[in-house]
Amino acid sequence: MVKLVDTLDLGSSALRRGGSSPSRRTRLKKGSSMKEQLVKAARMHAEGELERAKTNILVYMHQSVGIGEHSDIVEAIQEELDKMAAATDRIEMLNVHFSNDT
């Protein structure tokens, strides 16, 4: 049985990187600043965490039989909701404090 927390994060697989050099991956787009790129990366990270937690909840709701380690499905869903709330808070903070910068 595969644990949901053991699945790869998006973009973490070495196979997906396909041999690109670090300098190529970290180059800024023309006209963008490092600050803009950092805010964008933080936003995308939070959005990814939000979607991952939401997906886990959907799995719990539709395939709870296959999740043997979580005897209390409601508690597991609440933990994922907490992760969603934290990610949503980060997105909101980025929008409030850095929306003029990107």
Image (tube, helix red, strand yellow):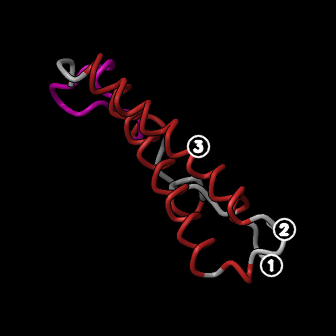
Question: Main SS type for the magenta part?
Answer: loop
Up/down of 88 relative to 79, above or below: above
On the image, numbered disc 1 is attached to which residue? 1
Q: Nearer the viewer, residue 81 or 12?
A: 81
Helix, strand, or loop for circle 3?
helix
| Image position, residue 58 (x, y; %) | 53, 70
On the image, numbered disc 3 is attached to which residue? 82
**What's the residue at 63%, 81% (across, down)?**
63
* Mark 3 neighbour class, 10 Å CA radius: few under 14, some 14 to 19, many 20 or more: some
**What's the residue at 48%, 43% (across, down)?**
21
CB-based contact (under 8 Å), mark 3 and mark 1: no
The amino acid type found where label 1 is placed reads Met
Helix, strand, or loop for circle 2?
loop
* Mark 2 neighbour class, 10 Å CA radius: few under 14, some 14 to 19, many 20 or more: few
| Image position, residue 14 (x, y; %) | 60, 57
| Image position, residue 82 (x, y; %) | 58, 43
On the image, numbered disc 2 is attached to which residue? 69
**Which region of the structure is painted magenta?**
25-37
